[in-house]
Image (cartoon, rainbow, N blue to C red):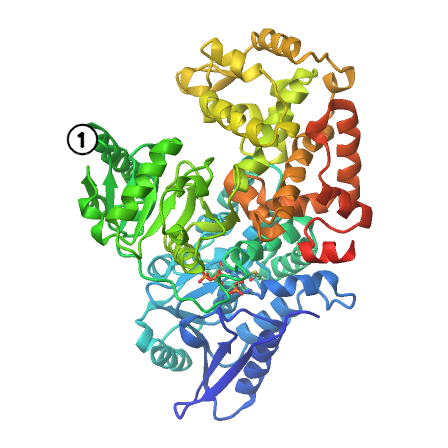
Amino acid sequence: MGSRGGHTRMEVGSDGVAVITIVNPPVNSLSFEVLHGLKVSFDQAIQRNDVKAIVVTGAKGKFSGGFDISAFGGIQEAKDRPKPGWISIDIVTDTIEAAMKPSVAAIDGLALGGGLEVAMACNARLSTPTSQLGLPELQLGIIPGFGGTQRLPRLVGLTKALEMILASKPVKGKEAFSLGLVDGLVQPNDLVNTARQWALDILGRRRPWVASLYKTDKLEPLGEAREILKFARAQAQRRAPNLYHPLVCIDVIEAGIVAGPRAGLWKEAEAFEKLVQSDICKSLVHVFFAQRGTTKVPGVTDRGLVPRQIKKVAILGGGLMGSGIATALILSNYPIILKEINGKFLDAGINRIKANLQSRVKKGKMTKENFAKAVSLVTGSLDYESFRDVDMVIEAVIENVSLKQQIFVDLEKYCPPHCILASNTSTIDLNLIGEKIKSKDRIVGAHFFSPAHVMPLLEIVRTKQTSPQVIVDVLNISKKIRKTPVVVGNCTGFAVNRMFFPYTQAGLLLVERGADVYQIDRVITKFGMPMGPFRLVDLVGFGVAIATGSQFIQNFPERTYKSMLIPLLQEDKRAGETTRKGFYLYDDKRKASPDPELKNYIEKARGISGVSVDPKLAKIQEKDIVEMIFFPVVNEACRVLDEGIAVKAADLDISAIMGMGFPPYRGGIIFWADSFGSKYIYSRLQKWSELYGEFFKPCAYLAARAAKGIPLSAPVEQAKSRM
Ligand SMILES: C[C@H](O)CC(=O)SCCNC(=O)CCNC(=O)[C@H](O)C(C)(C)COP(=O)(O)OP(=O)(O)OC[C@H]1O[C@@H](n2cnc3c(N)ncnc32)[C@H](O)[C@@H]1OP(=O)(O)O
């Protein structure tokens, strides 16, 4: 059954303490070998006469990152699955926790998921102040499966345990200590020695010998516990109505409180076994690895290039994007120069940055001192004189070709020759922007999403000339500022905007043929998007929507659906949320409500397009709405892959999730599409293109894969070689 690698090491000191070390780089995950090794080491330590007490720790400053996620596939496919509970009960509970010799977990770096669960089965835990401790399993569509649902509430109380598990939110060692999750805080150098002594102290009854599973002092009384669980259920349902594993988790926790921890462990083991087989788990595990895979770019990151140090960054333009990008950088301690064209704009830009930071202070995410420190990292400038020692420039001015061309000429003149020249353009061809300069290898796109200090994605756009070193450098910056990067090729809309252009277009086409705006948005939100296409256009604003639309009409005329609905609305000063009227009406609190007058505009637009209401689409079902909105998105994603704009399908999954809010529990756009199969999607699009026109026409990539029955996610070479 799957999962290979790693082992445990046991050394017995002259003090009679056996130190068992988990060794499985890079994060000491618990593979089946490691788990087996833990059992064998514990059995030996228990049997050996020279061992009095046990310390469990992890190699190289990391306790453990939890159960080996790459082993999930093995469990899913295995035919001769061992009975549920063989790890949680046989190893963690009946071997580790029940050992007749005391054990102490010495935690440095991280103890996550199964890692923390092993630590909680020890009789005490010591941690360094900065270690991360948590049970993030729900993020993977499963629940803690090595006893975490039972032991965490007994160590920290139900309320805190639910908060940590349901939000998959780890705590630092310091907080863990104040919660009672760890028994002492120790600096890394003293960790193992202190743990040895601690274990001997337990043996000598100078410290308590605790089995977490049977602790009751932190648990709330039953009545109160039931209320807390009820509240948690309601909250989980509200936060993620399409997910059921959080509810299963709450049921399992409740079972332990009501029927006792041993019954709780069994229920946990059975539920874990089922959930690990679920589509939601499969999708989320795919996302976990896909997200880590975006930084692996063939021909770029496999050359052994070392990222250069970026000490200072200059940002051109203090508008919404520029100030957001500046905020993202200073939050990771990069000193920045903000350049504007006059004092008024500069002040406005700096004030925007301050407002961004202030809102973090308000939310308790930033202290006042750190606010002052962050602000001090910003230097304003009205010229290029201070650009002589910058390592990177990010241009974020308005989308105007000749303005950008001039800026790049100036940059080449003033910046040092190693300086990276990045543009945040979302529509203009990078080759055009850099047309007038010589150092084309330094040009790269750094496409942030608004608000830049909040949205997690960074599209790194390369041209044919961009040097691999520059890409490696920008990948490194994105890691430092905690963004997920996706490296894409240069084209209109790059990957994200291009894939999601048909999202709105499909909506417009359906509405002109009789479907209801508000029903579409409702269904799409229920599917899991943060908002439907119409609410999204309202938010983005019609000015931007029309500008992007015209870019697409210019570049992809054959497949752009040319509806006049948005321009008609704009003509009437309905330009979206900022004007309080768009597809919806907005009140003082920006709450959206449907507008009965909208139908007049739709009728007018219908007249201009020359289409009539299709009785079938006027009564369209939920399933069809989802498919008619998203299959065109899939179709465009296939083109993006086929043209080599994206390196691999998984990158588009991550782009869709992080750039547009596609639900991660559906695995991303292509992963989701493959659950239908290329044949089905092709046949649907083909049918609609016959009925409703070119907009739906399946692309060659989709057609070829459908003909051979190959998944859309299969590498491009494979599909081509089979054709
Ligand atoms: C039964 C149990 O209850 C079930 C479980 O325990 S499920 C697992 C629970 N644990 C988790 O969810 C933790 C998942 N891991 C993480 O959050 C982060 O990787 C981390 C905080 C541990 C480290 O983060 P960071 O330093 O940024 O490194 P990151 O790039 O994420 O990971 C390093 C490598 O370790 C791998 N890795 C991390 N955790 C892993 C795990 N639990 N299993 C297998 N591989 C893992 C990553 O895939 C990555 O591999 P790569 O280098 O080949 O891409």
Q: Residue at x 58, y 53 (%)?
A: 647
- Indicate left or right for 434 with 639 as reference: left
- Indicate left or right for 102 with 559 as reference: left
Query: Callout 1: helix, strand or loop?
Result: helix
Q: Nearer the viewer, residue 77 or 347?
A: 347
Number of numbered tags placed on the structure image: 1
Question: What is the quadrant of residue 623 in the picture?
Answer: top right
Q: Residue at x 68, y 69 (%)?
A: 2
Q: Nearer the viewer, residue 330 or 296?
A: 296
**292 in relation to 578, above or below:** below
What is the three-letter code of the residue carrying label 1?
Answer: Gly
| Residue 226 is at least partly visible in this image | no
Question: What is the quadrant of residue 90 in the picture?
Answer: bottom right
Task: Tell me the crowding category of disc 1: few under 14, some 14 to 19, or many 20 or more residues within 10 angstroms, Cα based.
Answer: few
**519 in relation to 351, above or below:** above
Q: If the image is split into quadrants, where does the N terminus sit?
A: bottom right
- Residue 578: give x, y in percent of width and height: 41, 19
| Residue 398 is at least partly visible in this image | yes
Residue marked by disc 1? 343
- Residue 531: give x, y in percent of width and height: 54, 30
Q: Any atom of ligand 1 within 8 Å of the CB at mark 1?
A: no
Q: Residue at x 26, y 54 (%)?
A: 416
